[in-house]
Image: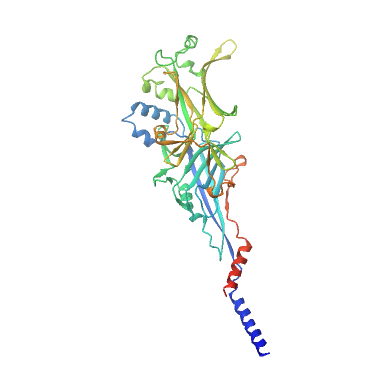
Amino acid sequence: MRMVALLLMLLSISLVSLATYVPSPPVYVTVTKIYVISMNLSHSEPPWGYIESIKAGHPLTYSELTSEENATAPWIGASGLTLTLTIVNATPTPYPIALGSATLSNSTGGVRWIINVTYLTSTFNTRQSPLSLRARWFILITASINGLNLTVFAFKTGYEMLGDVLGNLSTIGGYLTEPSGYKYSLWHHYLYNGTLWYVVPLPGIVVFYTWFGNYVGKLMPLPTTINNQGTFPSYLRYFTVALRQYYNSTVINSSLASVNYALGNETDYGYYIFNIVRLAPLGPLAYYTPMIMLSNGTLANPICLPIYYELSVVFQFENPAYGSFTPYLLFNELSHASSLITINDSLLLGGFLISYDFYNSTTLTITPLNSVISEGVNYTSCLVPIYDPVNVNKPLVIGGDASSASPNKPSGVMIPKPLLNAWLFRLLRIIINL
C-alpha cells in the first residue's frame, strides 16, 4: 500500500511538472509592408548621357538621335497600357515568393503599382521574414496587348534581399544590382522639346522613324507621278507608314504614322543630318517585344513563336474633283522576330524589328539599346523559367491579373500559417524530453 501511495504521489508530481512545461498556444501577428512604386515610363530611346558621350566620335549618329529624341515625346508607346509588375525568386528560397500588381499607365506614361507583402509571425515562428530573404530576383513588366502578355522589361538581379529590391524600385532614381555588382540605373534623362525628362525606359518598347525621299543614287526614287503632285513638302501629307505585328497570322498590334513635321523642320528634312535634300521622316512608330510571358510561369523566346512584322510605305493620290484618295504601295517588307538576348546575365531583350535601308535596298536590325547589344549573348532556349527552380513542376501563381487590371490594384503574397500538426509535434517533443 505504501508503494502504491508513493507511486500515486510521484505520478501527481509528474503531472503537475508536465503541466508546468506545456507551452501556451501561439499568438499570431499579421505583418503587412506596403510598397508604392511610382514611375514615369518611356520607350527605349538612348538616355541623354549616352547620346552626349558619342558626340565627338559619331557626329552623324549624335545629330540623328538628338533630333529624333527632341521631337519625340518619351511616353510614346508607353501610355495607355495595362502593365503588370511581377517579382519572383529566380533562385531557391525557403519558400516561394510571388509578388504582382497591375495598373494602367496614364497619358504621359505615369504608373503607380502597389505591392503588399503580408505574412504571419507568432511566438513560435522561426520562419524568416520574406523581406530579409536573399536570392536572385526576376523583375518583369508585361503589357497586355490583345490578350497577350508582351514582356517590355525583364531583369534578373544579383543576390540581394527582397526588401532592398523593393526599396530601390520604390525610390525615384533607384537601381537594380547585376550579378557583377554593377548598379543598373532604372531612371534616365531624355531630351524632349528642349527639356530633360526623368523617366524609366522600357527596353521592350521601341520607337523609330523611316526616312524616305527622292534622291537619285542615294535613296529609292519616287515615281514621277508623285513628284508632280506639288511643291515639297506640301505633298508630304499624303505619305503614311504602317507597322503590323503578327502572331499566328493574326495582327496583335498595329501603328500608323505620317510625316513628322517637327522632326522634318528641325533637320531641314534630313539635310542637317544626312546632307541629302528632300527627305521625309515618317513616324514615330512603336512596337513591342514579342517575348511573351506565358501563364505557366515562363518567358517564350521570340524565335520559338510564330511572330513576324510587316512594314509598308503608302502614298495616297488625291482626286481633287471627288476629294477621294487612291493608295499607291511604295514599299512593303516582311521580317521575322529575332532571338532572345541577355546583357550582363541580367537584362533580357527580344524580338527586334527588321527595318529597311533604302540606300542599299537591304534590311537592317534596329535594337532598343543600339551599340550596347554587342555586349549581349544569344539565349537559345525556347522557354526561360521564372518560377522557383526548386518547384519546377509547380509554377507560381502571379498576383495582379492584367486582363482585369484597375489603377492601383494591390496584390501580394500571403505566407501560409503552419499546420496545427507541426505544433502538436513540437509539444510532443517537449513532453518526451521531460
Q: Where is residue 126? Give x, y as percent.
A: 53, 62
Residue 187: which quarter of the image?
top left
Q: Nearer the viewer, residue 124 or 81?
A: 124
Q: Quadrant of the C terminus?
A: bottom right
Residue 283 to residue 195: above or below: above
Res. 260 visible in picture: no
Residue 236 to residue 106: above or below: above
Q: Where is residue 53? Give x, y as percent.
A: 34, 34
Q: Where is residue 374? Give x, y as percent.
A: 40, 33
Judge from the rendering whether residue 114 lies leftward or rightward of residue 279; answer left or right: right
Q: Nearer the viewer, residue 158 or 252?
A: 158
Res. 50 visible in picture: yes
Q: Nearer the viewer, residue 9 or 290?
A: 9
Q: Quadrant of the N terminus?
A: bottom right
Q: Where is residue 262? Give x, y as percent.
A: 44, 25
Q: Residue furthest right?
A: 1
Q: Residue furthest left?
A: 56
